[in-house]
Structures are given as C-alpha cells and as structure tokens.
Amino acid sequence: METVQCIGCGVLIQTEDPTKLGYAPASSLEKEEVICQRCFRLKNYNEIQPVELTDDDFLKILNGLGDQKGLIVKIVDIFDFNGSWLPGLHRFVGNNPVLLIANKADLLPKSVKKNKVINWLKREAKSLGLQTADILLVSAAKGQGMVEAMDAIEQLRKGENVYVVGSTNVGKSTFINRIIKQATGEEQVITTSQFPGTTLDMIQIPMDDGKSICDTPGIINHHQLAHYVDPSELKLILPKNEIKPKVYQLNAEQTLFIGGLARFDFIQGDRSAFTAHLSNQLTIHRTKLSNADALYADHKGELLSPPGKNHAEKYPELVRHEFSIKSPKMDIVFSGLGWITCQTGNVVVAAHVPKGVAVMVRPSLI
Ligand code: GDP
C-alpha cells in the first residue's frame, strides 16, 4: 500500500484504529492533502486529542528527543505515580532540562501539604534516576497550579521548544488544552506546522516566538491495573474526586478485599493501622485471612465487585506478592488502583493483584 503522511505532524496515516496514532477516516484518503484526526481537531477546535502508540514507536520518539534542543515537560499522575512513570526517560533526554509535573493534585486529600508532596516527589524522582530542573504539582482539570506551571515552562525553556511527554491517562491532553486556552483565549485558531524532515510524529503548537509546544502521543504502561478491567468498569476504579482515606485497625491474619480487584493480607505483626487510599466508589471487605481464598472463589463478581458478574470470568487470576515491612509509614502500591499505607513498621503483608500488574513499596506519600 502507498504510504501517506499527515500534512500536520508527518505521522504515517492509518484508517483502522481511531485511538491510535495517525488515524484518519478512509474517506479522507481521497483528498490531495491528508491530515490526521489529532491535527484536525487541533486545527479546527483548538484541542489536543489523546492517542496511544506502541512501545517501539515511543522509543523512537524518545530517541529523537535527545537530538532536539528544548525543555522536556514530563507529566505523571500523582494518584498513580509509579504506574505513570516513564522509566527510561533520563537516558533519552540528552542535555535537555526536565520539568516534572505531577497532575491530578485535586485527588489528594485537602489536608495534605503541597510542600510535603513536592519533597516526596523530589526524593522519588532522584531515586528513580531522573534529574529535574523543577517539580510542580497541578490539577490540569481544575486549573490549580497552571499559572505557575506556565511561568516555569517559560523560564526553563530559554526560548526553545517544549516537548510534553507522559503515559496515557496522566492528563497530558487536558494539560496542553488548558495551556492553549490560557495562552491564546478561545478565539484564535491554532494551526499545526510540521518542521521539515521531522520523523517525531509530534503535533507542534506554535508559540509567539516561533518555537512550539510539541505534543507526543502517550505510551501505555502495561503494568497498570486499568488495562485489565473492562472499560465500562474503569470509572469505578479511577477516582474522580478528592480521595477520602479509610483507616482500618487490623490484627494479624486479617484480609481486606478491594472489591474483587485486589486483596491485602496482614500476615504478621502487632495490631496496627492501615490506611487505604482508593477511589471512594470502591467497597472494601474485611475478612479473616483463613477465609479469604474461599470468599474470593464464592463471591467474586457479586459481593466482591468490581469486576461485576459479566466481567469476573475474564478477570485475570490474582498473584500474591509478600513484603516484610520494617519502617513505619510505608505505602503498598497497587499500580493504577491506589495504595494502602502501613502506619507501623515490623509487619509482614501480602498484596494480591492480577498477573502482570505491578505492586511496589515506597515511603508514604501522605
Ligand atoms: P492523556 O491520555 O494523558 O492525554 O489524558 P487525558 O487528558 O485524556 O485525561 C485522562 C483522564 O484523566 C480523563 O478522564 C481526565 O478527565 C482525567 N484528568 C485529567 N486531568 C485531571 C486532573 O487534573 N484531575 C483529575 N481528577 N482528573 C484529571
């Protein structure tokens, strides 16, 4: 088949999958100049549309970033920090500065001090090997922290381009759309412009000084729980509002079921407090460790839901990960679902998640 490129961003046009990079309706191929759906929406509605791409495509884009000059803006989801982290980014950015933006601040309990979260982000970024020029906490959806973010971008980019990267669902499109609206007002029509010879498949949103904000497509992080649930149930899992932490005083050999999605066992240690940070819409069931297997086998999809009746069969088998926690205030993170904070140290716990979903331990965020 003859290959056709988008006149906006240079991506190869495909007509099969609207959620993937380079999609254009088949009818548009008859035109002389073909524009992909993402560029079309930017041009006509001033709106960035989220798209996904494969791991290989993403590596190609990351590789290209090191050859460019400009500011890298890396967006992560504060509710799913580890799940939305792009692990290899520091190897690809070359000498370019990285501004780390943690989005969805509105989901954190209001009582949490912003500085504490920023300090936590600093430590985590450092231990994950990323050097950052600055770290900011924003809510792109609610507009919190966006003025500071735009100021920081302006300062750090030193007159160069801005490259925005992030995994899918971190709110990258919401963030860029807000920048477009705040910078231009609704009126002005934005056009896409391809830098000659670019192979980066990026949408470039021109700024006043002739430089651009470049939107890269989002990478899918396969170890996030979101990829294992039916899309119709995803809205129960992803929090929409400020999360209300729930405290459980547990004795050893007690279990918490997070719906039917995951399970937390307190195996050994003195009676202690465990704080669940999950979507408010999820129901937690407490039971004896000795009953837990049978309860799950009998009530998955019913008492223990989501996944609901229609999806429980397809939901992957849970795999057990055991942790011996020495220090107090450690989070057991269920990638994409939330976390449970062990308030005291010297406990042995286990997390059960679908095969393929990551579980990790980290110093408490809150
Ligand atoms: P992208 O895939 O990274 O481009 O992400 P989107 O911009 O499409 O957003 C993914 C989801 O996160 C959508 O459901 C958004 O409504 C939601 N979202 C984006 N920004 C925020 C935010 O600041 N707070 C909250 N609570 N949700 C957000």
Image: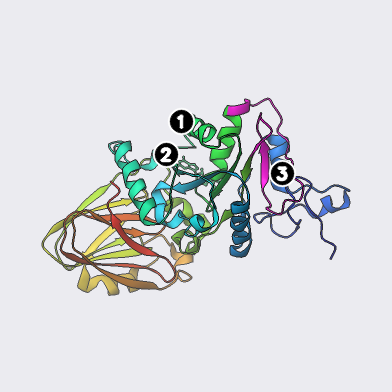
Quadrant placement of the N terminus: bottom right
Say which label, 1 or 2, has the lower sequence index.
2
Secondary element type, mark 1: helix
Q: Which mark is residue 190?
A: none
Mark 1 vs ligand 1: CB below 8 Å: no
Q: Which residue is mark 1?
A: 148
Residue 299 position, x and y percent, is 34, 68
The number of numbered discs placed on residues in the rendered structure image is: 3
Q: Main secondary structure of the magenta part?
A: loop
Q: Nearer the viewer, mark 3 or mark 2?
A: 2
Residue 106 position, x and y percent, is 40, 38
**Label 3 amino acid?**
Cys
Say which label, 3 or 2, has the lower sequence index.
3
Point 55% across, 49% down: residue: 165
**Label 2 amino acid?**
Leu
Q: Which residue is mark 3?
A: 39
